[in-house]
Image (cartoon, rainbow, N blue to C red):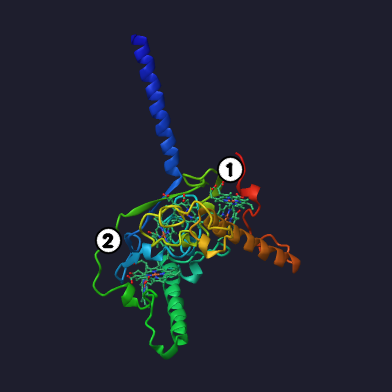
Amino acid sequence: MKQLFIFVCSFAIILMTGSALVSAIEKQDELSLPTGTMTLTAPEHSQTKMSPVVFPHSLHLKFSCKSCHHEWDLESPVKGCASSGCHEKLWASPPEDKPSGERKIKSLTGAYHKACRDCHRSQLKEQKTKNKQKTAGTATMSEGSGPVTCEACHPETHAAIVNSLDTLPIPLGTLTLTAPEGVEPKRPSVTFPHSGHFDYTCQTCHHEWDGKSPVQNCTVSGCHDQLESAEKTRNINDPKNSKYFLAAYHKACIQCHRSLLKQRDRLEKSGVLDDNILPEYGPVACVECHFEN
Ligand code: HEC
Ligand code: HEC
Ligand code: HEC
Ligand code: HEC
Ligand code: HEC
Ligand code: HEC
Protein backbone atom coordinates (compact mmCIF):
# COMPACT_ATOMS: atom_id res chain seq x y z
CA MET A 1 0.00 0.00 0.00
CA LYS A 2 2.81 2.37 1.02
CA GLN A 3 4.67 1.51 -2.16
CA LEU A 4 1.62 2.28 -4.21
CA PHE A 5 1.33 5.63 -2.41
CA ILE A 6 4.96 6.49 -3.24
CA PHE A 7 4.39 5.41 -6.82
CA VAL A 8 1.30 7.59 -7.12
CA CYS A 9 3.16 10.54 -5.55
CA SER A 10 6.14 10.31 -7.85
CA PHE A 11 3.86 9.86 -10.82
CA ALA A 12 2.01 13.00 -9.73
CA ILE A 13 5.34 14.85 -9.43
CA ILE A 14 6.32 13.76 -12.93
CA LEU A 15 2.97 14.95 -14.17
CA MET A 16 3.33 18.26 -12.37
CA THR A 17 6.86 18.99 -13.53
CA GLY A 18 5.92 17.78 -16.96
CA SER A 19 3.13 20.29 -17.24
CA ALA A 20 5.30 23.02 -15.69
CA LEU A 21 7.82 22.38 -18.45
CA VAL A 22 5.18 22.65 -21.11
CA SER A 23 3.92 26.00 -19.83
CA ALA A 24 7.52 27.26 -19.52
CA ILE A 25 8.06 26.48 -23.17
CA GLU A 26 4.79 28.12 -24.07
CA LYS A 27 5.81 31.28 -22.18
CA GLN A 28 8.83 31.72 -24.45
CA ASP A 29 6.49 31.66 -27.40
CA GLU A 30 4.81 34.78 -26.16
CA LEU A 31 5.69 38.45 -26.35
CA SER A 32 4.70 40.96 -23.69
CA LEU A 33 3.58 43.95 -25.71
CA PRO A 34 3.57 47.24 -23.76
CA THR A 35 0.20 48.81 -24.51
CA GLY A 36 0.30 51.93 -22.37
CA THR A 37 2.50 55.01 -22.30
CA MET A 38 6.23 55.07 -21.61
CA THR A 39 8.68 57.85 -20.94
CA LEU A 40 11.79 57.94 -23.09
CA THR A 41 14.87 59.22 -21.30
CA ALA A 42 18.54 59.61 -22.14
CA PRO A 43 20.74 56.82 -20.76
CA GLU A 44 21.57 57.20 -17.08
CA HIS A 45 24.42 59.58 -16.17
CA SER A 46 24.26 61.48 -19.45
CA GLN A 47 24.13 65.26 -19.38
CA THR A 48 20.81 66.38 -20.72
CA LYS A 49 19.24 69.68 -21.62
CA MET A 50 15.72 68.67 -22.45
CA SER A 51 12.87 67.05 -20.57
CA PRO A 52 12.13 63.36 -21.06
CA VAL A 53 9.65 62.45 -23.77
CA VAL A 54 6.27 60.89 -23.15
CA PHE A 55 5.59 58.23 -25.74
CA PRO A 56 2.19 56.54 -26.07
CA HIS A 57 3.30 53.19 -27.48
CA SER A 58 -0.25 51.91 -27.97
CA LEU A 59 -1.21 54.87 -30.20
CA HIS A 60 1.57 53.76 -32.54
CA LEU A 61 0.61 50.13 -32.92
CA LYS A 62 -1.22 50.78 -36.17
CA PHE A 63 2.22 50.97 -37.76
CA SER A 64 4.37 47.97 -38.45
CA CYS A 65 6.55 47.07 -35.43
CA LYS A 66 9.50 47.19 -37.77
CA SER A 67 8.97 50.84 -38.61
CA CYS A 68 10.66 51.43 -35.23
CA HIS A 69 12.12 48.07 -34.12
CA HIS A 70 13.93 47.78 -37.43
CA GLU A 71 16.36 45.05 -36.33
CA TRP A 72 13.75 42.83 -34.70
CA ASP A 73 13.64 39.29 -36.12
CA LEU A 74 9.94 38.90 -35.20
CA GLU A 75 10.73 36.14 -32.68
CA SER A 76 13.35 37.17 -30.09
CA PRO A 77 12.72 39.61 -27.24
CA VAL A 78 12.54 43.23 -28.46
CA LYS A 79 15.67 45.18 -27.47
CA GLY A 80 15.67 48.74 -26.14
CA CYS A 81 16.89 51.38 -28.60
CA ALA A 82 20.00 52.15 -26.51
CA SER A 83 21.02 48.49 -26.12
CA SER A 84 24.66 47.62 -26.53
CA GLY A 85 25.55 47.51 -30.22
CA CYS A 86 22.58 49.72 -31.14
CA HIS A 87 22.03 53.45 -30.52
CA GLU A 88 24.23 53.40 -27.41
CA LYS A 89 25.61 56.91 -27.65
CA LEU A 90 23.43 59.90 -26.86
CA TRP A 91 25.35 62.00 -29.40
CA ALA A 92 27.43 61.09 -32.44
CA SER A 93 31.22 61.25 -31.93
CA PRO A 94 33.04 63.99 -33.81
CA PRO A 95 34.01 62.87 -37.34
CA GLU A 96 37.74 62.52 -36.53
CA ASP A 97 36.96 59.98 -33.78
CA LYS A 98 34.89 57.77 -36.04
CA PRO A 99 36.57 54.45 -36.80
CA SER A 100 36.58 54.20 -40.57
CA GLY A 101 35.01 51.21 -42.26
CA GLU A 102 32.75 50.43 -39.32
CA ARG A 103 29.02 50.30 -39.83
CA LYS A 104 27.55 53.71 -39.13
CA ILE A 105 25.11 53.69 -36.24
CA LYS A 106 23.04 56.74 -35.46
CA SER A 107 23.27 58.36 -32.05
CA LEU A 108 20.26 57.85 -29.79
CA THR A 109 19.23 61.49 -30.21
CA GLY A 110 19.64 61.28 -33.97
CA ALA A 111 17.79 57.98 -34.19
CA TYR A 112 14.85 59.19 -32.11
CA HIS A 113 14.59 62.50 -33.91
CA LYS A 114 14.72 60.82 -37.28
CA ALA A 115 12.21 58.09 -36.42
CA CYS A 116 9.77 60.14 -34.37
CA ARG A 117 9.91 63.62 -35.83
CA ASP A 118 10.30 62.63 -39.46
CA CYS A 119 7.23 60.42 -39.35
CA HIS A 120 5.17 63.11 -37.60
CA ARG A 121 6.30 65.63 -40.21
CA SER A 122 5.34 63.40 -43.09
CA GLN A 123 2.00 62.59 -41.44
CA LEU A 124 1.32 66.30 -41.08
CA LYS A 125 2.20 66.89 -44.72
CA GLU A 126 -0.04 64.07 -45.85
CA GLN A 127 -2.94 65.41 -43.82
CA LYS A 128 -2.47 68.93 -45.12
CA THR A 129 -2.65 67.63 -48.67
CA LYS A 130 -5.70 65.57 -47.83
CA ASN A 131 -7.38 68.53 -46.18
CA LYS A 132 -6.65 70.71 -49.19
CA GLN A 133 -8.27 68.13 -51.39
CA LYS A 134 -11.38 68.19 -49.27
CA THR A 135 -13.74 70.79 -50.63
CA ALA A 136 -14.20 74.23 -49.08
CA GLY A 137 -11.65 73.51 -46.37
CA THR A 138 -14.44 72.98 -43.88
CA ALA A 139 -13.38 69.47 -43.15
CA THR A 140 -11.82 69.03 -39.74
CA MET A 141 -8.62 67.10 -39.30
CA SER A 142 -9.79 63.63 -38.55
CA GLU A 143 -6.53 62.30 -37.17
CA GLY A 144 -3.59 63.66 -35.22
CA SER A 145 -0.14 63.68 -36.73
CA GLY A 146 2.01 63.58 -33.62
CA PRO A 147 4.13 66.45 -32.26
CA VAL A 148 6.79 68.14 -34.43
CA THR A 149 7.98 71.08 -32.33
CA CYS A 150 10.64 70.81 -29.63
CA GLU A 151 8.32 71.83 -26.80
CA ALA A 152 5.58 69.45 -27.88
CA CYS A 153 7.90 66.52 -27.21
CA HIS A 154 10.14 68.15 -24.57
CA PRO A 155 7.76 70.34 -22.54
CA GLU A 156 9.28 73.16 -20.47
CA THR A 157 8.12 71.66 -17.24
CA HIS A 158 9.63 68.26 -16.84
CA ALA A 159 6.92 65.68 -17.01
CA ALA A 160 6.84 63.05 -14.30
CA ILE A 161 8.38 59.84 -15.56
CA VAL A 162 5.50 57.45 -16.05
CA ASN A 163 5.74 53.99 -17.43
CA SER A 164 2.46 52.19 -17.48
CA LEU A 165 2.92 48.53 -16.84
CA ASP A 166 0.06 47.43 -19.03
CA THR A 167 1.04 44.65 -21.36
CA LEU A 168 -0.76 42.28 -23.68
CA PRO A 169 0.45 38.72 -24.31
CA ILE A 170 1.01 38.13 -28.03
CA PRO A 171 1.45 34.58 -29.32
CA LEU A 172 4.65 34.11 -31.32
CA GLY A 173 5.51 31.15 -33.53
CA THR A 174 2.78 29.12 -35.20
CA LEU A 175 -0.91 28.89 -34.42
CA THR A 176 -3.22 26.08 -35.45
CA LEU A 177 -6.33 27.46 -37.07
CA THR A 178 -9.35 25.18 -36.89
CA ALA A 179 -12.96 25.47 -37.95
CA PRO A 180 -15.18 26.94 -35.21
CA GLU A 181 -17.24 24.70 -32.97
CA GLY A 182 -20.37 23.43 -34.69
CA VAL A 183 -18.66 22.92 -38.04
CA GLU A 184 -17.82 19.45 -39.28
CA PRO A 185 -14.44 20.19 -40.92
CA LYS A 186 -13.92 18.91 -44.44
CA ARG A 187 -10.26 19.88 -44.53
CA PRO A 188 -7.36 19.47 -42.10
CA SER A 189 -6.60 22.45 -39.83
CA VAL A 190 -4.14 25.15 -40.93
CA THR A 191 -0.68 25.70 -39.47
CA PHE A 192 -0.26 29.47 -39.49
CA PRO A 193 3.12 31.12 -38.79
CA HIS A 194 1.73 34.07 -36.78
CA SER A 195 4.91 36.02 -36.04
CA GLY A 196 6.13 35.21 -39.55
CA HIS A 197 3.49 37.74 -40.59
CA PHE A 198 4.53 40.57 -38.21
CA ASP A 199 6.18 42.44 -41.10
CA TYR A 200 2.64 43.59 -41.73
CA THR A 201 0.72 45.79 -39.33
CA CYS A 202 -1.38 43.89 -36.83
CA GLN A 203 -4.50 45.57 -38.26
CA THR A 204 -3.91 43.89 -41.62
CA CYS A 205 -5.71 40.97 -40.00
CA HIS A 206 -7.00 42.26 -36.65
CA HIS A 207 -8.80 45.07 -38.43
CA GLU A 208 -10.95 46.06 -35.44
CA TRP A 209 -8.09 46.16 -32.89
CA ASP A 210 -7.46 49.50 -31.14
CA GLY A 211 -3.87 48.79 -30.09
CA LYS A 212 -4.59 48.24 -26.42
CA SER A 213 -7.61 46.05 -25.72
CA PRO A 214 -7.31 42.27 -25.83
CA VAL A 215 -7.31 40.90 -29.38
CA GLN A 216 -10.52 39.07 -30.25
CA ASN A 217 -10.71 35.75 -32.05
CA CYS A 218 -11.81 36.05 -35.66
CA THR A 219 -14.90 33.94 -35.04
CA VAL A 220 -16.25 35.54 -31.83
CA SER A 221 -19.90 36.40 -31.79
CA GLY A 222 -20.67 39.49 -33.90
CA CYS A 223 -17.54 39.05 -36.03
CA HIS A 224 -16.98 36.23 -38.52
CA ASP A 225 -19.35 33.96 -36.63
CA GLN A 226 -21.48 32.64 -39.48
CA LEU A 227 -20.96 28.88 -39.84
CA GLU A 228 -22.65 28.54 -43.22
CA SER A 229 -22.35 30.48 -46.44
CA ALA A 230 -25.18 32.71 -47.52
CA GLU A 231 -27.74 31.01 -49.72
CA LYS A 232 -26.54 30.03 -53.16
CA THR A 233 -23.25 31.82 -52.97
CA ARG A 234 -19.90 30.74 -51.55
CA ASN A 235 -18.20 33.66 -53.23
CA ILE A 236 -15.67 35.10 -50.78
CA ASN A 237 -16.15 38.57 -52.23
CA ASP A 238 -19.92 38.58 -51.79
CA PRO A 239 -20.72 41.00 -48.94
CA LYS A 240 -23.38 38.55 -47.78
CA ASN A 241 -20.52 36.26 -46.83
CA SER A 242 -18.45 38.77 -44.88
CA LYS A 243 -19.42 37.10 -41.61
CA TYR A 244 -18.97 33.57 -42.94
CA PHE A 245 -15.78 32.33 -41.26
CA LEU A 246 -14.48 30.43 -44.32
CA ALA A 247 -14.90 33.46 -46.57
CA ALA A 248 -13.23 35.77 -44.04
CA TYR A 249 -10.17 33.53 -43.65
CA HIS A 250 -9.86 32.80 -47.34
CA LYS A 251 -10.31 36.44 -48.26
CA ALA A 252 -7.65 37.60 -45.81
CA CYS A 253 -5.14 34.81 -46.33
CA ILE A 254 -5.44 33.74 -49.95
CA GLN A 255 -6.00 37.17 -51.50
CA CYS A 256 -2.77 38.53 -50.08
CA HIS A 257 -0.74 35.46 -51.08
CA ARG A 258 -2.27 35.49 -54.55
CA SER A 259 -1.64 39.18 -55.16
CA LEU A 260 1.99 38.75 -54.11
CA LEU A 261 2.32 35.79 -56.45
CA LYS A 262 0.83 37.84 -59.28
CA GLN A 263 3.21 40.69 -58.57
CA ARG A 264 6.09 38.20 -58.65
CA ASP A 265 4.95 36.69 -61.94
CA ARG A 266 4.66 40.14 -63.49
CA LEU A 267 8.19 41.05 -62.40
CA GLU A 268 9.60 37.74 -63.60
CA LYS A 269 7.96 38.24 -66.98
CA SER A 270 9.57 41.66 -67.21
CA GLY A 271 12.95 40.01 -66.70
CA VAL A 272 13.58 40.49 -62.97
CA LEU A 273 15.12 37.30 -61.62
CA ASP A 274 16.76 38.55 -58.41
CA ASP A 275 15.22 36.81 -55.39
CA ASN A 276 16.06 39.83 -53.24
CA ILE A 277 13.72 41.97 -55.31
CA LEU A 278 11.00 39.45 -56.12
CA PRO A 279 8.36 39.45 -53.37
CA GLU A 280 7.92 36.37 -51.24
CA TYR A 281 4.43 34.94 -51.16
CA GLY A 282 2.50 32.40 -49.11
CA PRO A 283 0.62 29.27 -50.18
CA VAL A 284 -2.28 29.58 -52.63
CA ALA A 285 -3.19 25.94 -53.29
CA CYS A 286 -5.63 24.13 -50.98
CA VAL A 287 -3.24 21.41 -49.85
CA GLU A 288 -0.46 23.87 -49.10
CA CYS A 289 -2.58 25.26 -46.25
CA HIS A 290 -4.79 22.28 -45.45
CA PHE A 291 -2.49 19.30 -45.03
CA GLU A 292 -2.46 16.38 -42.60
CA ASN A 293 0.36 16.60 -40.10
C1 HEC B 1 8.70 63.72 -31.82
C2 HEC B 1 9.35 64.01 -30.58
C3 HEC B 1 10.57 64.91 -30.54
C4 HEC B 1 10.70 66.17 -31.08
C5 HEC B 1 9.69 66.93 -31.92
C6 HEC B 1 11.99 66.65 -30.64
N1 HEC B 1 12.62 65.69 -29.88
FE1 HEC B 1 14.43 65.88 -28.96
N2 HEC B 1 14.34 63.94 -28.34
C7 HEC B 1 13.25 63.12 -28.51
C8 HEC B 1 13.54 61.84 -27.91
C9 HEC B 1 12.60 60.64 -27.87
C10 HEC B 1 14.84 61.94 -27.35
C11 HEC B 1 15.62 60.83 -26.60
C12 HEC B 1 15.10 60.65 -25.19
C13 HEC B 1 15.52 61.73 -24.26
O1 HEC B 1 16.72 62.06 -24.25
O2 HEC B 1 14.67 62.27 -23.54
C14 HEC B 1 15.31 63.28 -27.64
C15 HEC B 1 16.55 63.78 -27.24
C16 HEC B 1 16.94 65.08 -27.39
C17 HEC B 1 18.17 65.65 -26.87
C18 HEC B 1 19.25 64.87 -26.11
C19 HEC B 1 18.87 64.68 -24.66
C20 HEC B 1 18.87 65.95 -23.85
O3 HEC B 1 17.88 66.12 -23.08
O4 HEC B 1 19.80 66.74 -23.93
C21 HEC B 1 18.18 66.98 -27.20
C22 HEC B 1 19.25 67.99 -26.87
C23 HEC B 1 16.97 67.23 -27.95
N3 HEC B 1 16.24 66.06 -28.04
C24 HEC B 1 16.63 68.47 -28.47
C25 HEC B 1 15.53 68.70 -29.28
C26 HEC B 1 15.26 69.97 -29.95
C27 HEC B 1 16.12 71.20 -29.81
C28 HEC B 1 14.12 69.81 -30.67
C29 HEC B 1 13.43 70.80 -31.61
C30 HEC B 1 14.26 71.31 -32.67
C31 HEC B 1 13.65 68.43 -30.43
N4 HEC B 1 14.53 67.80 -29.59
C32 HEC B 1 12.48 67.90 -30.96
C33 HEC B 1 12.06 63.43 -29.14
C34 HEC B 1 11.79 64.61 -29.81
C1 HEC C 1 6.54 54.37 -33.47
C2 HEC C 1 7.58 53.50 -32.99
C3 HEC C 1 7.22 52.14 -32.44
C4 HEC C 1 6.36 51.21 -33.00
C5 HEC C 1 5.56 51.28 -34.28
C6 HEC C 1 6.41 50.06 -32.11
N1 HEC C 1 7.25 50.32 -31.05
FE1 HEC C 1 7.69 49.07 -29.53
N2 HEC C 1 8.79 50.51 -28.63
C7 HEC C 1 9.13 51.72 -29.20
C8 HEC C 1 10.02 52.46 -28.32
C9 HEC C 1 10.63 53.82 -28.57
C10 HEC C 1 10.21 51.63 -27.19
C11 HEC C 1 11.10 51.93 -25.97
C12 HEC C 1 12.46 51.38 -26.28
C13 HEC C 1 13.48 51.72 -25.24
O1 HEC C 1 13.10 51.82 -24.06
O2 HEC C 1 14.65 51.84 -25.60
C14 HEC C 1 9.43 50.41 -27.42
C15 HEC C 1 9.39 49.32 -26.56
C16 HEC C 1 8.87 48.08 -26.89
C17 HEC C 1 9.00 46.89 -26.09
C18 HEC C 1 9.71 46.80 -24.75
C19 HEC C 1 11.16 46.57 -24.99
C20 HEC C 1 11.95 46.50 -23.74
O3 HEC C 1 12.94 47.24 -23.65
O4 HEC C 1 11.57 45.73 -22.86
C21 HEC C 1 8.39 45.86 -26.78
C22 HEC C 1 8.28 44.41 -26.35
C23 HEC C 1 7.87 46.43 -28.01
N3 HEC C 1 8.18 47.79 -28.04
C24 HEC C 1 7.20 45.71 -28.97
C25 HEC C 1 6.60 46.28 -30.09
C26 HEC C 1 5.78 45.53 -31.04
C27 HEC C 1 5.51 44.04 -30.99
C28 HEC C 1 5.33 46.42 -31.95
C29 HEC C 1 4.38 46.18 -33.10
C30 HEC C 1 3.04 45.73 -32.72
C31 HEC C 1 5.89 47.72 -31.59
N4 HEC C 1 6.63 47.59 -30.46
C32 HEC C 1 5.69 48.89 -32.31
C33 HEC C 1 8.69 52.20 -30.42
C34 HEC C 1 7.78 51.58 -31.24
C1 HEC D 1 5.47 55.78 -38.44
C2 HEC D 1 5.02 57.05 -37.94
C3 HEC D 1 5.32 57.47 -36.50
C4 HEC D 1 6.47 57.26 -35.79
C5 HEC D 1 7.73 56.52 -36.23
C6 HEC D 1 6.28 57.89 -34.52
N1 HEC D 1 5.03 58.48 -34.46
FE1 HEC D 1 4.26 59.49 -32.84
N2 HEC D 1 2.50 59.65 -33.81
C7 HEC D 1 2.24 59.24 -35.11
C8 HEC D 1 0.85 59.54 -35.42
C9 HEC D 1 0.14 59.25 -36.73
C10 HEC D 1 0.30 60.14 -34.28
C11 HEC D 1 -1.14 60.61 -34.08
C12 HEC D 1 -1.88 59.44 -33.50
C13 HEC D 1 -3.29 59.71 -33.18
O1 HEC D 1 -3.63 60.84 -32.87
O2 HEC D 1 -4.04 58.74 -33.23
C14 HEC D 1 1.37 60.20 -33.28
C15 HEC D 1 1.19 60.75 -32.01
C16 HEC D 1 2.23 60.96 -31.10
C17 HEC D 1 2.10 61.68 -29.85
C18 HEC D 1 0.86 62.42 -29.37
C19 HEC D 1 -0.07 61.53 -28.66
C20 HEC D 1 -1.30 62.25 -28.22
O3 HEC D 1 -1.72 61.98 -27.12
O4 HEC D 1 -1.84 63.06 -29.00
C21 HEC D 1 3.33 61.64 -29.24
C22 HEC D 1 3.71 62.27 -27.90
C23 HEC D 1 4.21 60.90 -30.11
N3 HEC D 1 3.51 60.50 -31.24
C24 HEC D 1 5.52 60.64 -29.83
C25 HEC D 1 6.36 59.87 -30.65
C26 HEC D 1 7.72 59.52 -30.30
C27 HEC D 1 8.45 59.96 -29.05
C28 HEC D 1 8.18 58.74 -31.32
C29 HEC D 1 9.52 58.07 -31.47
C30 HEC D 1 9.90 57.13 -30.45
C31 HEC D 1 7.11 58.61 -32.31
N4 HEC D 1 6.03 59.32 -31.86
C32 HEC D 1 7.22 57.92 -33.51
C33 HEC D 1 3.12 58.65 -35.97
C34 HEC D 1 4.41 58.23 -35.65
C1 HEC E 1 -3.58 30.49 -47.27
C2 HEC E 1 -4.13 29.35 -46.63
C3 HEC E 1 -5.36 28.68 -47.20
C4 HEC E 1 -5.53 28.20 -48.47
C5 HEC E 1 -4.58 28.29 -49.65
C6 HEC E 1 -6.82 27.55 -48.47
N1 HEC E 1 -7.40 27.65 -47.25
FE1 HEC E 1 -9.19 26.83 -46.68
N2 HEC E 1 -9.03 27.69 -44.85
C7 HEC E 1 -7.93 28.40 -44.41
C8 HEC E 1 -8.16 28.81 -43.04
C9 HEC E 1 -7.19 29.60 -42.17
C10 HEC E 1 -9.43 28.32 -42.67
C11 HEC E 1 -10.12 28.45 -41.31
C12 HEC E 1 -9.57 27.43 -40.35
C13 HEC E 1 -10.07 26.04 -40.64
O1 HEC E 1 -11.29 25.87 -40.76
O2 HEC E 1 -9.25 25.12 -40.77
C14 HEC E 1 -9.95 27.61 -43.85
C15 HEC E 1 -11.17 26.96 -43.89
C16 HEC E 1 -11.60 26.16 -44.92
C17 HEC E 1 -12.83 25.38 -44.93
C18 HEC E 1 -13.86 25.34 -43.82
C19 HEC E 1 -13.46 24.38 -42.72
C20 HEC E 1 -13.55 22.93 -43.17
O3 HEC E 1 -12.51 22.24 -43.03
O4 HEC E 1 -14.58 22.49 -43.63
C21 HEC E 1 -12.88 24.73 -46.12
C22 HEC E 1 -13.98 23.78 -46.61
C23 HEC E 1 -11.71 25.11 -46.87
N3 HEC E 1 -10.95 25.99 -46.10
C24 HEC E 1 -11.42 24.67 -48.14
C25 HEC E 1 -10.36 25.12 -48.92
C26 HEC E 1 -10.17 24.79 -50.32
C27 HEC E 1 -11.08 23.88 -51.13
C28 HEC E 1 -9.05 25.45 -50.74
C29 HEC E 1 -8.45 25.49 -52.14
C30 HEC E 1 -9.35 26.02 -53.16
C31 HEC E 1 -8.52 26.16 -49.59
N4 HEC E 1 -9.35 25.94 -48.50
C32 HEC E 1 -7.37 26.93 -49.58
C33 HEC E 1 -6.78 28.67 -45.12
C34 HEC E 1 -6.54 28.34 -46.44
C1 HEC F 1 -1.66 37.78 -41.33
C2 HEC F 1 -2.65 37.93 -40.31
C3 HEC F 1 -2.22 38.34 -38.93
C4 HEC F 1 -1.36 39.36 -38.56
C5 HEC F 1 -0.57 40.31 -39.45
C6 HEC F 1 -1.33 39.36 -37.11
N1 HEC F 1 -2.17 38.40 -36.62
FE1 HEC F 1 -2.57 38.02 -34.67
N2 HEC F 1 -3.69 36.40 -35.19
C7 HEC F 1 -4.05 36.08 -36.48
C8 HEC F 1 -4.93 34.92 -36.45
C9 HEC F 1 -5.55 34.25 -37.66
C10 HEC F 1 -5.08 34.57 -35.09
C11 HEC F 1 -5.92 33.44 -34.52
C12 HEC F 1 -7.24 34.03 -34.23
C13 HEC F 1 -8.29 33.00 -33.95
O1 HEC F 1 -7.96 31.98 -33.36
O2 HEC F 1 -9.44 33.25 -34.30
C14 HEC F 1 -4.29 35.53 -34.32
C15 HEC F 1 -4.21 35.55 -32.94
C16 HEC F 1 -3.71 36.61 -32.19
C17 HEC F 1 -3.82 36.77 -30.76
C18 HEC F 1 -4.49 35.79 -29.82
C19 HEC F 1 -5.94 36.10 -29.73
C20 HEC F 1 -6.63 35.18 -28.80
O3 HEC F 1 -7.52 34.49 -29.24
O4 HEC F 1 -6.27 35.16 -27.63
C21 HEC F 1 -3.22 37.95 -30.43
C22 HEC F 1 -3.11 38.56 -29.04
C23 HEC F 1 -2.70 38.53 -31.66
N3 HEC F 1 -3.03 37.69 -32.70
C24 HEC F 1 -2.04 39.73 -31.74
C25 HEC F 1 -1.41 40.20 -32.89
C26 HEC F 1 -0.55 41.38 -32.92
C27 HEC F 1 -0.23 42.28 -31.75
C28 HEC F 1 -0.13 41.51 -34.21
C29 HEC F 1 0.84 42.53 -34.77
C30 HEC F 1 2.20 42.45 -34.28
C31 HEC F 1 -0.74 40.43 -34.97
N4 HEC F 1 -1.50 39.65 -34.14
C32 HEC F 1 -0.58 40.24 -36.34
C33 HEC F 1 -3.66 36.72 -37.63
C34 HEC F 1 -2.74 37.75 -37.69
C1 HEC G 1 -0.82 40.86 -46.17
C2 HEC G 1 -0.30 39.65 -46.73
C3 HEC G 1 -0.54 38.31 -46.05
C4 HEC G 1 -1.66 37.91 -45.36
C5 HEC G 1 -2.91 38.69 -45.03
C6 HEC G 1 -1.42 36.53 -44.98
N1 HEC G 1 -0.20 36.13 -45.43
FE1 HEC G 1 0.60 34.26 -45.20
N2 HEC G 1 2.31 34.88 -46.06
C7 HEC G 1 2.54 36.11 -46.60
C8 HEC G 1 3.90 36.17 -47.12
C9 HEC G 1 4.57 37.36 -47.77
C10 HEC G 1 4.46 34.91 -46.87
C11 HEC G 1 5.87 34.44 -47.22
C12 HEC G 1 6.76 34.90 -46.10
C13 HEC G 1 7.80 33.94 -45.72
O1 HEC G 1 7.80 32.82 -46.21
O2 HEC G 1 8.60 34.33 -44.88
C14 HEC G 1 3.43 34.11 -46.22
C15 HEC G 1 3.61 32.79 -45.85
C16 HEC G 1 2.63 31.98 -45.33
C17 HEC G 1 2.78 30.56 -45.07
C18 HEC G 1 4.00 29.71 -45.39
C19 HEC G 1 5.06 29.86 -44.37
C20 HEC G 1 6.22 28.96 -44.65
O3 HEC G 1 6.92 28.68 -43.70
O4 HEC G 1 6.40 28.57 -45.80
C21 HEC G 1 1.59 30.11 -44.55
C22 HEC G 1 1.24 28.70 -44.12
C23 HEC G 1 0.71 31.26 -44.48
N3 HEC G 1 1.36 32.37 -44.97
C24 HEC G 1 -0.59 31.21 -44.03
C25 HEC G 1 -1.40 32.32 -43.93
C26 HEC G 1 -2.73 32.28 -43.35
C27 HEC G 1 -3.42 31.04 -42.81
C28 HEC G 1 -3.21 33.55 -43.40
C29 HEC G 1 -4.55 34.08 -42.92
C30 HEC G 1 -4.85 33.88 -41.52
C31 HEC G 1 -2.19 34.39 -44.02
N4 HEC G 1 -1.12 33.60 -44.33
C32 HEC G 1 -2.32 35.75 -44.28
C33 HEC G 1 1.65 37.17 -46.66
C34 HEC G 1 0.38 37.18 -46.08
Residue picked out by circle 1: 188
In this rendering, would 284 be left or right of 103?
right
Amino acid type assigned to the residue bearing label 2 in the image: Val
- Say whether mark 1 is within 8 Å of ligand 4: yes
| Alpha carbons under labels 1 and 2: distance apart | 48 Å
Is 152 in front, or is 111? 152
- The quadrant of the picture occupied by the C terminus is top right
Depth-wise, is mark 1 or mark 2 nearer the camera? Answer: 1
Residue 87's place in the image compared with 177, above or below, is: below
Residue ID at (40%, 88%):
137
Please tell me the numbered disc located at residue 162.
Answer: 2
Within 10 Å of disc 2 (Cα), the crowding (few <14, some 14-19, many 20+) is: few
Q: Quadrant of ligand 1?
A: bottom left
Is 166 in front, or is 193? 193
Secondary structure state at the residue bearing disc 1: loop
Picture coordinates of residue 215, whole percent (x, y): 40, 55
Q: Earlier in the sequence, mark 1 or mark 2?
A: 2
Residue 195's place in the image compared with 98, above or below, is: above
